[in-house]
Structure formats: structure tokens, C-alpha cells
Image (cartoon, coloured by chain):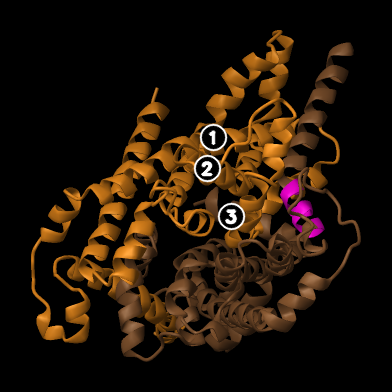
Chain colours: A orange, B brown
């Protein structure tokens, strides 16, 4: 009995904080998404009306919302595979018995992960500067004309994707290295005795053994990439021609610029729903693949 | 024997190339921050400053309020780390080792809600803090960081390895639960405490969206928010913005370099076993 009382004292502070500052707002957000909560309701709560799913209906007919969703999906669909491929390649290189100075390389490759997004975005803006940036200077060496990376609607999103991959791949790299190290060495030895090439060893040992890690990594990365916000906010301010406005950016404008709280909450829930569906599909695919 | 030498050369060359890509922007940032104003806006872009100078840093601290932002970031990240560490460790230990009614169910609810992105709660949270008078205060910035489900989960995973006999023996000797926690549990949990402390510190330091929303008064800005605002004002001042980036990134980078063993351990504990 004494233990039970002590236990509640131990969990109470954390549960109180999480309950009041996370669970209550989440539930309130769902409630707000069913109302026309806006600037008028903010001034006087009596102006608040229940509107059912009208916010959701309106959003699903709003071209700006679909644009934001499209940009976010572009970022996720292009960014996640590139990011995972970079992580896996780096992990394979670092895990190779032939690699030298592993601790140095591991730290060097991981360093961008711990840096501040805003500061790095500022740097990338100058690296990709049309006139004075190193990227265009380097490309001019092979005869490519200067590209307006962040000012051209076709190039802005790819540049942001490149930035996100550079910033994040070290994280999954570490997880992949752990996954690679858990593969028994005997398997490779047996394969080498049978005369398997590097590629065959990768295809028939490394890849299948890495499947659970791959599922985990792709789910985590996907969830993170859906929450794109700081990169376009600093690098392009959503431009050029709104081509980098993500769903969260749209929500930020809708909620904190125009104070359409009801509509912005609906945006948040639509994003959550989408993330949830994508994660469930991944999990289902991962499980059905795992079965013989 | 020729094959491995060739492969080894390729592997190491690729590693050097990738490291160059990850480190170049960071080193270049440092180099440009030491250039005289306007020096970086040349073609071809200079690699090293002709005459290294601290002008940009002096300008930032003297006129742009950088010292203030640095202190804000430092104070907020430290406060959030200390408080959330206390709350998360207590809860994580209790979920692992102390029996109470509904423990498993409660923990499952917490775990399940990890899938809800924090941004869903942001608008009502903002309105709530506005009502409480916490908008545009330091308190408003750290309130959502005061406890975290992920932190509780991390501590719980680690605390599960504490043998029950150890705690039972202490109880038979007449030690109270708080005493057991302070004398026996905390020393065992030390590695995970360090890990969680770095995680929280870095996350609070680097956080952008929430402080951007809560803070309107410039004097309260954290470094990332201040840097974003400065970069919109000083589009032309490359050198100064690079110095600002150095000030923002250097503390967390150094912290990581010193404690990276703990950081990587925590990363693996949090994801692979989850």
C-alpha cells in the first residue's frame, strides 16, 4: 500500500504536465476543429458556433490546402527514400572492416544532426546563393549556368530536400550501423566460402537481416518529414510562388496569422490522420513481408 | 590480394567525400564569420578570410542583442532540462518498478499517444497560455517541455534492468521509497540521466516553431528565433549572419562532442528497442 501511494507521487508531476499541456489541448483542438472559432470568437466567446465537419469540408475544397498537401507529399515521397538511401550507404561504408578512422568519420557524418535547423538553413541560403554561392561556383566548373536555387519554383523544393537529407541522414545512419552489427558474422563467412560476391552478400544477407530496421527507420523518418516547417520558413518563406508552403506552414498561417483557430485545428487533424494512415500501411506492409 | 586494397581505397575515399560534404558548410560558416563585412559577396567566393577579424561578432553582441539571446537560450534550455529530467526520471522509474493499479494501461495510453504530433496541441495550448498570462514569457516557452512521454519511456526501459531484490532488500531494511529512489535508483540510472539531459537540452535549444509562436517580445527571443528574424532583416550581411549561426550552433556542437557516447547510446535505446 505504501508503495502504491509513493508510486502515484512519483508519476503525478509528469502526468499532470502531460495531461494539462498535451492531452487537454489535443482534445480541445478536436473540439475547436468542429467550430467556427476565429478572431470574433477570440474577442467574445459568445460568437462561437458549432459547425460539425464544415471546416474539414471547406479545407478539402480549398486549392491552397491541396497545394500545401502536395508540397508536403513531394517532400516526403522524394525526401524519405533519398534520406534512407544516404543513411544506409553511409552506414555500410562506416561498418566496413576496410574503413579507417571510424570514430572521426562517425562524428563528422553525425554532426549536422545536432545542429540548429535555423542556423544551418541560413548557411544553405548562402551556399546556394545564385551569384556568390559555392554550389553555383562549383557547378560553373563543369559548365552549368548559375541556377536560382531558392528563387525558382522548380528548384526550391529539391534544394530544401537536399538540405533536409544533409541535416538528417546521420541519425538513421547510427540506427543502421547498430542493425548491421547485429548480423552474425558467420553468415558472411559461409557466403564467402561459397564464393558469394559483395553484391550477393548484400542482397541475400544484409538486406533481409536489415528489414526490421528498415521498417523502423522509414516510419520514424516519414513521421518527421511530414512535419516540415522550419526549413521553408527560414529558407524561402513559403515561396517562390507559394511552392514550398507545407501543411504545417499552412496551419501556422491559418492559425497564428489569420486566427482561424477552428480551421487550423482541422488542418492539424487532417495531417495527423494522413500520418496515421501512412504509418499503418507501412506497418501492415512490413508485417506481411516478414511472413514466409 | 589486389582486390581488398582497391576496395579499401574506394571505401575510404567515399568516406572522405561524405565527410567533406557534411563538414564543408560548417567550416565555411566559421570562415565567413571571420571575414570583413562584404568580403564574402565576391565572385569567385573566397574560401578563407584575407584578414581574419572579429568585427561581426563584436557587432552582433554590441548592437544586435546577441548576448541577450544567448542567455535566453541558455537559461531556458537549462531550466527545461533540469525540471523535465526530474519529472521524467521519477515517472519512468515508477512505471518500471513500482506497482500501482492501472499502471500497464496508463503506460499503454502514453505510448500510443506518441503518434500524435505536437503541433496538433499548439493552437489550444497557445490560447490556454494566453488565458493564464503566460504568452510572451519564459514560462510559456518551457511549459510544453516540462515532461515528455519519450523521456519517460527511455527511463523506464533502462530502469527495468534494476533487480527487484535490490529494492526489496532496502525495503526490508526499513528504507522509505524516496530514500530508495535517491540512494539506490538514481546512481544506477546515471548513464540514462546524462543521455536524457543532452537530448532535452539539444531539443529545447534547437526548437523553433513553439518559441516562434509564443514569443513576440524581442528581448525574450531564443537564438533560433532571433536568428530567423535577423536573417530577414540583414539579407545582405552574409558575414554577420554566419557569425550569428556560429554562436547558435557552437554550444550544442561542443556539448555533443564532449558527451557523444551518451547521446548515441540513448538514440539506440530509444529507437531500436522501441
Residues drawn in magenta: B23-31
Q: Mark 1 points at which residue?
A: A82
Pinpoint residue B20: horizontal percent, then vertical percent. Answer: 77, 41
Residue under label 2, please give it. A161
Mark 2, Cα crowd under 10 Å, few <14 / some 14-19 / many 20+, is: many
Mark 3 burial class by Cα count in 10 Å: few <14, some 14-19, many 20+: some
Give the Cα distance between marks 3 and 1: 25 Å
Disc sitting over residue B269 in the figure: 3
Q: Residue at x 82, y 72 (%)?
A: B55
Q: Are marks 2 and 1 in contact (CB under 8 Å)?
A: yes
Q: In this view, does B257 lie to the left or right of A200?
A: right
From the viewer's side, name the closer residue of A196 and B160.
Answer: A196
* Numbered disc in front, either 2 or 1: 2
Do marks 2 and 1 share a subunit? yes
State which quadrant residue B200 falls in.
bottom right
Residue A278 location in percent, x, y? 33, 42
Eyeballing the image, is B246 above or below A283?
A: below
Furthest-bottom residue in this view? B133
- Tell me which corner region of the image, top left, top right, bottom left or bottom right, holds residue A92: top right
Q: Which quadrant of the rendered structure holds the C terminus of chain A? A: top left
Residue B59 can be seen in this image: yes
- Tag of residue B175: none
The Cα–Cα distance between marks 2 and 1, rounded to whole angstroms, is 9 Å
Residue A97 seen anywhere in this rendered image of the structure? no
Of all chains, the one bearing label 2 is: A
Amino acid at each position: 500500500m505504501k508503495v502504491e501511494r509513493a508510486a502515484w507521487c512519483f508519476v503525478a508531476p509528469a502526468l499532470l504536465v502531460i495531461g494539462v499541456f498535451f492531452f487537454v489541448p489535443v482534445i480541445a483542438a478536436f473540439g475547436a476543429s468542429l467550430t467556427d472559432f476565429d478572431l470574433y470568437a477570440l474577442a467574445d466567446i459568445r460568437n462561437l458556433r458549432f459547425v460539425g465537419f464544415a471546416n474539414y469540408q471547406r479545407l478539402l475544397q480549398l486549392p491552397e490546402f491541396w497545394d500545401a498537401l502536395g508540397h508536403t507529399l513531394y517532400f516526403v515521397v522524394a525526401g524519405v527514400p533519398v534520406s534512407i538511401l544516404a543513411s544506409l550507404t553511409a552506414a555500410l561504408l562506416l561498418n566496413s572492416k576496410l574503413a579507417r578512422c571510424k570514430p572521426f568519420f562517425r562524428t563528422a557524418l553525425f554532426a549536422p544532426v545536432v545542429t540548429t535547423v535555423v542556423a544551418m538553413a541560413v548557411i544553405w541560403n548562402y551556399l546556394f546563393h545564385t551569384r556568390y554561392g559555392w554550389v553555383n561556383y562549383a557547378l560553373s566548373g563543369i559548365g552549368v549556368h548559375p541556377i536560382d536555387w531558392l528563387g525558382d519554383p522548380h528548384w526550391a523544393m529539391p534544394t530544401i530536400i537536399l538540405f533536409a537529407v544533409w541535416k538528417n541522414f546521420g541519425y538513421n545512419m547510427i540506427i543502421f550501423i547498430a542493425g548491421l552489427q547485429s548480423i552474425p558474422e558467420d553468415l558472411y563467412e559461409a557466403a564467402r566460402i561459397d564464393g558469394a560476391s559483395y553484391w550477393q552478400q548484400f542482397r541475400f544477407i544484409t538486406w533481409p537481416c536489415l528489414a526490421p530496421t528498415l521498417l523502423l527507420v522509414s516510419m520514424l523518418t516519414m513521421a518527421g518529414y511530414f512535419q516540415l516547417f522550419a526549413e521553408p520558413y527560414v529558407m524561402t518563406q513559403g515561396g517562390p510562388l507559394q511552392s514550398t508552403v507545407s501543411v504545417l506552414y499552412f496551419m501556422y498561417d491559418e492559425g497564428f496569422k489569420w486566427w482561424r483557430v477552428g480551421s487550423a485545428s482541422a488542418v492539424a487533424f487532417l495531417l495527423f490522420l494522413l500520418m496515421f494512415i501512412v504509418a499503418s500501411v507501412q506497418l501492415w506492409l512490413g508485417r506481411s513481408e516478414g511472413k514466409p | 590480394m589486389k582486390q581488398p586494397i582497391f576496395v579499401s581505397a574506394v571505401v575510404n575515399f567515399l568516406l572522405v567525400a561524405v565527410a567533406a560534404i557534411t563538414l564543408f558548410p560548417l567550416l565555411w560558416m566559421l570562415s565567413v564569420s571571420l571575414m570583413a563585412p562584404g568580403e564574402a559577396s565576391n565572385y569567385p567566393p573566397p574560401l578563407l578570410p584575407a584578414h581574419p577579424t572579429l568585427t561581426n561578432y563584436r557587432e552582433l553582441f554590441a548592437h544586435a542583442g546577441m548576448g541577450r539571446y544567448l542567455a535566453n537560450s541558455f537559461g531556458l534550455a537549462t531550466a527545461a532540462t533540469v525540471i523535465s529530467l526530474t519529472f521524467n526520471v521519477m515517472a519512468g522509474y515508477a512505471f518500471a518498478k513500482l506497482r500501482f493499479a492501472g499502471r500497464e494501461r496508463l503506460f499503454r495510453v502514453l505510448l500510443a499517444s506518441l503518434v500524435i504530433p505536437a503541433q496538433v496541441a499548439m493552437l489550444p495550448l497557445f490560447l490556454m497560455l494566453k488565458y493564464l498570462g503566460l504568452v510572451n514569457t519564459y514560462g510559456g516557452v518551457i511549459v510544453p517541455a516540462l515532461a515528455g512521454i519519450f523521456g519517460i519511456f527511455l527511463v523506464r526501459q533502462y530502469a527495468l534492468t534494476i533487480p527487484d531484490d535490490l529494492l526489496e532488500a532496502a525495503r526490508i531494511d526499513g528504507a522509505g521509497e524516496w530514500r530508495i529512489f535517491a540512494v539506490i535508483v538514481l546512481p544506477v540510472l546515471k548513464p540514462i540521466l546524462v543521455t536524457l539531459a543532452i537530448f532535452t537540452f539539444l531539443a529545447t535549444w534547437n526548437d523553433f516553431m513553439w518559441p516562434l509562436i509564443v514569443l513576440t517580445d524581442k528581448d525574450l527571443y531564443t537564438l533560433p528565433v532571433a536568428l530567423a528574424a535577423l536573417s530577414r532583416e540583414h539579407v545582405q550581411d552574409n558575414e554577420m549572419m554566419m557569425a550569428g549561426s556560429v554562436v547558435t550552433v557552437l554550444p550544442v556542437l561542443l556539448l555533443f562532442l564532449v558527451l557523444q557516447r551518451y547521446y548515441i547510446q540513448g538514440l539506440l535505446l530509444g529507437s531500436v528497442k522501441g
